[in-house]
Image: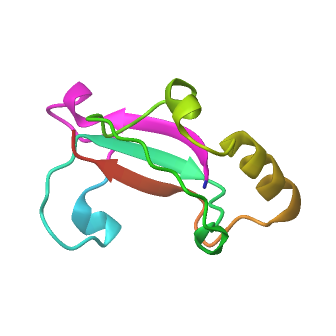
Amino acid sequence: MSEYSHFYDKADKPLLEINTISNKEQGWIGDEDWTIQIHYTNLYNTEKQNIPICVACAHVILNYTTFKDRIKDDLYKYYENYIFYAEPDRSKKELIFSVNT
């Protein structure tokens, strides 16, 4: 779980990659092309909490408010508790998630 910062779409910058980072620069293996790069901060590790989320949709990026009725638990409540009780992983100032669309 993390806090959204901003995103870049490679389609918006077809000639110069000013704000995007290559797979090599991120230390990723493989040459898969991606189109959207999402930047986020304050990463909370939720692996041990077993929060079940299953949403079937053709889109890669989903708006939570659109699908919250299909999810059993209220993720906003989880988030509020995490930011109150837990410390985010501050090993990196900003983290990046890239998506193929």
The furthest residue to the right: 84
Q: Is residue 15 magenta?
A: yes
Q: Where the N terminus falls, by quadrant? A: bottom right
67 sits to left or right of 15: right
> What colouring style does the render use?
rainbow
Q: Residue 8: give x, y in percent of width and height.
A: 36, 36
Q: Which of the 4 image quadrants contains residue 4?
A: top right
Which residue sits at x=42%, y=42%? 55
- Residue ID at (62%, 73%): 91
Say left or right for 20 vs 71.
left
Query: What range of the chain is rendered magenta?
Result: 2-20
Residue placed most toward the observer, 68 or 30: 68
Q: Residue 86 placed where, x, y %?
A: 81, 65
Please determine whether, in this image, residue 28 is positioned above or below residue 100.
below
Judged left or right of residue 69, residue 61 is: left
Q: Nearer the viewer, residue 42 or 45?
A: 45
Q: Is residue 13 visible?
A: yes
**Which image quarter is the C terminus in?**
top left
Asked if residue 64 shows in the view, the reply is no
Residue 46, above or below 9: below
